[in-house]
Image (tube, rainbow, N blue to C red):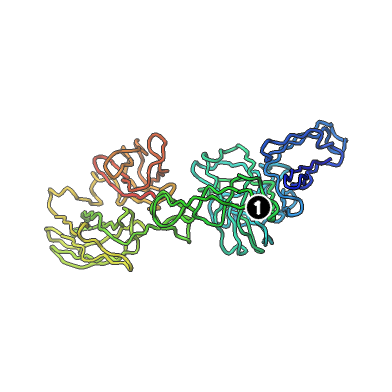
Amino acid sequence: GHVRVYELDEGTNTWEQVWGDIDGASPEDQSGESVVLSEDGTRLVVGARLNDNGTASDAGHVRVYDDLGCASSTQVEYYSDFESDFGFWNDGGNDCDRVSSNANSGIYSIRLRDNSGINSSIYSDSLDLEGISFVTIRFSFVAVSMESGKSFFLEVSTDNGSSYEIYKTWVSVENFRNGRRVNESISINRPFSAATRFRIRNNGFSNNDRIYVDDIVIIACGVDGCPVTGQPCEDTNPCTTGEIFNEGCECVGGIEVDNDMDGYCIGEDPDDDDPCVPNPASELCDNPADTMIVDDISIYKSYAGPNWNAVARITVLDEFGCGVNSASVAVSWAGPKPGNSSGFTNDQGVVGFNSPKTKVDGCFTLTVNSVTKDGWDWDITTSEVTNQICNWPESSNLVRDDDQDHLMRMPLKINPNPFSDRVGITFELKEAGPVLLEIYRIDGQKIRTLRSDVMQPGLHSERWDGLDGGGSTVLNGLYIVRLQMNGLVQNQRVCLLR
């Protein structure tokens, strides 16, 4: 059996079929014996009294249809259940696999894991959708071990996969939960091409972060296959949101949105709540910064036999408080043995210098002479430019490898910095002792304790997920990672940019 849906054309007072025939599971299942259509015409429930040509248990079944598709004369449909192969989809790489688990129907599904770009994806064949104005994509998925905040994307390409744009993002906890199956239906209204591809890509954290996708249906509609008036749609302007179809099946009414007023609208900006310029080579943002500040000059002493020297660690930040990489820093040393040094900052905006070694007691004074980078200015008026350390017994900055009072090896390492989701914190202990690892706001307010216990010697790693002690997401900005042990304190700045 099958079901047909008709719409009354009030202009001609005639009924016209608006969807294709909706067939049952088998020729004799008596599908359509019961039918219910929602008032707005977007959901159809079809009941069938029998199954499998009357040869099974005749238990019957019910099917629910949402966004049924197009008028039969304009519909093109692609379907893959992955039972025999990938169908019209393609294996993205090492982190994509056809597996016999977590299927919605049958046995097989597609497993996407980790966040290794195309390797964590499945992408369609090149589809000829020239002249198509409306596409509905339906699929079933279930997540396994996806950490909170991790995500996956539906992406669209109109140049045969040379470039993709993210059309929709699903975020763990916010849009789905592990182990709970979701049957998704996405409507896309935009121009397509004769070389259209779709891609589903995981953006997890490791191989344990998995999405299982099954039963993918793509329904492509021509201009005659319009959805009902008032249904949400997406026009061709990436800067607008909130569009709907009018009675003429035109996608209208969008409002241009630029929440952070950085000149890049919500459709162009991966984080429209943070003033940043999108970097097309990644999913992160590059700050529109052009001014450098020497934010910190840390200096301490090192000993090698009878010789000693000063060791400096300089941090260069932009006006948004984030590290500036590849900045050239030139310094000079005055004191028992003068000298000059230069170097480039790392991804955290940090560069280190050593003074000449000497046996003579006295004070080394470091002065920053220049900070340069193409297209950037150095604001010397707000920068630290000098610091000093002396080799006297009363010095409080003493750090020597054979000093048992100093149990931590320098420096505290933060990576990546800036970070958007989670950051790794690495430090090394020379011997066992009580350790306190905390996160502070730049104004000195503690927001979370990451570790507070006795730790053994060796290399240790912790992670901060950008949440405070109550489990709430903190705002973008600069934070302090503080490590304390037996009275020795190390501080390191970290920049959060979502």
Inspect the image, locate mark 1, and give the three-letter code of the amino acid beneath it: Val
| Residue 458 higher or lower than 348, as above or below | above
Question: Is residue 272 at least partly visible in the picture?
Answer: yes
Residue at 16% of width from left, 55% of height from top? 389
Label 1 SS: strand
Residue at 18% of width from left, 56% of height from top? 387
Residue at 87% of width from left, 35% of height from top? 54
Q: Quadrant of residue 335?
A: bottom left
Residue at 67% of width from left, 50% of height from top? 226
Look at mark 1 in the image and give the residue it sits on: 135
- The one nearer the camera, 327 or 171, is 171
- The one nearer the camera, 320 or 425, is 320
388 displayed left or right of 282 = left
Where is residue 190 shown, x and y percent of the image? 60, 56
Where is residue 204 shown, x and y percent of the image? 53, 48
Q: In which quarter of the image is residue 124?
A: bottom right
- The one nearer the camera, 453 or 439, is 439
Where is residue 119 shown, x and y percent of the image? 58, 56
Question: Is residue 498 at least partly visible in the picture?
Answer: no
